[in-house]
Image: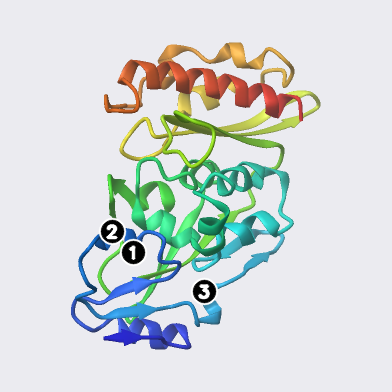
Amino acid sequence: MFLRPRTLSEAVEALEWPGARILAGGTDFYPALGDRPVACPVVDITAVPELTGITVTDRKIRIAGGTTWSEVVATPLPRCFDALKAAAREVGSVQIQNRGTIAGNLCNASPAADGVPPLVALDAEVELVSRAGRRRVPLAAFITGNRRTVRQDGEILASVIVPRRIEGPSCFLKLGARRYLVISIAMVAVILESENGMVRQARVAVGACSAVAQRLGGLEQALAGMPAKPGIGAMVEPQHLAGLSPIDDVRATAAYRLDAARTLVARALERCAAG
């Protein structure tokens, strides 16, 4: 059964079919099938206007769940979103960026999902819509593990909401085994807000080094009040990464991931300090 609702209310009603699955960009949906045929009701949400577009206000920025990564890159946004735009350019090829959606990236919940660290650094929330109503969940609590989220059957990730609590330059850096089309060994997102040459607040998130992207709270606290100038990267100490839990796999050892993450955080801080 293939359903293509035209409104958000129709979409959540269609998800009442037992076993129904959402289809948006399809960049994860179809590869996951392999050689198997589609054996469940499919709800194609690409014709729902409420699920596309980016809205900017003085208090928040709303990114609809069906917004593609190419649209994120093309939309004028504050500097604190530069890290998200850089991550968007790393989501597969340009063809994938033209089809893949921000909600799909989050709901897929890969530890190496490029979009997660910048959004975690931005204190993003996700809005989930079902026939029972709407609820908001901090992104840091939405993803609970490798390929696991708190999204329930019948819910659609309708939007990502970013409160405008920080301004300033941001940076996203990623390490992989090659330059393009690669799964991350480690990646970081940094936002640095300064005032009168001093760090007012910092946000630092690391991905691919734990089942879920993690903020480095201890480092963020240590950076507050420090001069926002070259050399700031030297403040990153091994203990600041103690909360991470990298694994050994075919791409890298856990020890290498930790060392790479520390280096990437230091470089990202330097770039932000340079404006």
Q: 203 or 5: nearer the eye?
A: 5
Badge 2 amino acid? Ala
What's the residue at 23%, 84% (across, down)?
17
Distance of mark 3 from mark 2, alpha carbons?
A: 23 Å
From the image, tell me which residue sits under label 3: 51
For label 2, count other residues whose C-alpha is less than 10 Å away and answer few (under 14), some (14-19) or many (20+): few
Query: Furthest-front residue in view?
Result: 35
Where residue 97 sits in the image (x, y, percent)?
55, 56
Is residue 21 toward the left or the right of residue 163 in the image?
left
| Number of callouts | 3
Which sits earlier in the primary sequence, circle 3 or circle 2?
2
Where residue 104 sits in the image (x, y, percent)?
42, 60
Q: Mark 2: which secondary structure?
A: helix
Image quarter where the C terminus lies is top right
Badge 3 amino acid? Leu
What's the residue at 31%, 20% (across, down)?
253
Badge 1 amino acid? Phe
Which sits earlier in the primary sequence, circle 3 or circle 1?
1
Is residue 47 toward the left or the right of residue 147 in the image?
right
Visible residue check, residue 211: yes
Q: Mark 3: which secondary structure?
A: helix
Quadrant location of residue 255?
Answer: top left
Q: Nearer the viewer, mark 3 or mark 1?
A: 1
Q: 240 or 177: nearer the eye?
A: 177
Give me the disc on residue 32.
2
Q: Nearer the viewer, mark 3 or mark 2?
A: 2
For label 3, count other residues whose C-alpha is less than 10 Å away and answer few (under 14), some (14-19) or many (20+): many
Q: Is residue 120 above or below residue 158?
A: above
